[in-house]
Amino acid sequence: MSAVLVIAGTDSSGGAGLTRDVATLSAFGMDALCAVSAVTAQSEREVAAVLLIPAALVRAQIETALGSGRVRAVKTGMLGARDTVEALAAALPPRERLPLVVDPVLAASSGGVLLDEAGRAALRTRLLPRATLLTPNLPEAALLLGAAPAGSPGEIVAQGRALCALGAAAVLMKGGHATGALATDWLVSADGAVREFTGARYAGGRRGTGCALASGVAAGLARGLELAVACARAKEHVTALLQAAA
């Protein structure tokens, strides 16, 4: 059976990370192969402890998974360190052969740093040129660009294009941190095309929605769906999760 390879950290609370990725892929009828990049002790309030897995072991997990012949797409979450980012970039074939969805997990919802500046630099230079899709929220996009968070649709699209200029084939700028009655995500492609995906905005929130969105897109790409269709289906899935939690 076809599968998605997920490279991410564990979350002891079960709200995000590999737990959310595997649950999402299961909901989309897709198997998951996993490469663990970090083990974390987390709650809704804090990141209490982090143990990074040695980069050589992360790479061995990736290469073993790819050797199964089942992987049809790859999704990354928390990577934790520059060495892990570089090991991942070295292990993957070009995006023309295997789609890659990069969820740039830079910090936890509770505020703990999950990828330092050296890791962010490696992500910009090593992973973005390999990415089929980058899925930042507005604060993450700003951190990757060294800019202030976008405050208007025009600024959001401009930052998406700036991230494409770093090498990503497309960027899905997630609007969950924006304001307004509707939650809109913008799919910005390197060829200049822009698509909007809009859903209801619900009060509060739910940890792991970024993981779910990126994994849902990866599931669609693994099935051979066009990127825009995969994004739309993943957006619908996340909207349903938020509605259930409201």
Image: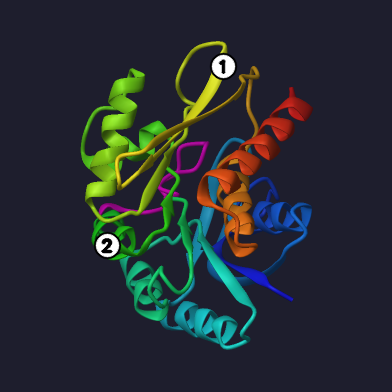
Quadrant position of residue 197: top right
Identify which residue is drawn at 70% across, 59% down: 22
Quadrant position of residue 187: top left
Q: Amino acid at mark 2?
A: Ala
Disc 2 target residue: 122
Label 1 secondary element: strand
Disc 1 target residue: 182
Relative horizontal placement of residue 140, taking residue 183 as reference (left or right): left
In this rendered view, identify the residue nearer to me: 155 or 12: 155
Total tally of numbered discs in the picture? 2
Prevailing secondary structure of the magenta residues? loop
Residue 73: image location, x then y, percent: 55, 67
What span is colored magenta in the figure? Answer: 104-117
Quadrant where the N terminus sits is bottom right
Residue 165: image location, x then y, percent: 22, 48
In this rendered view, identify the residue nearer to me: 113 or 131: 131
Identify which residue is drawn at 36% across, 21% down: 153
- Is the residue 135 above or below the residue 58 in the image? above
**Dot 2, crowdedness within 10 Å: few (<14), some or many (≥20)?**
some
Residue 193: image location, x then y, percent: 36, 38
- Asked if residue 224 shows in the view, the reply is yes
- Asked if residue 11 shows in the view, the reply is no
Label 2 secondary element: helix
In this rendered view, identify the residue nearer to me: 29 or 211: 29
Identify which residue is drawn at 60% across, 53% down: 215
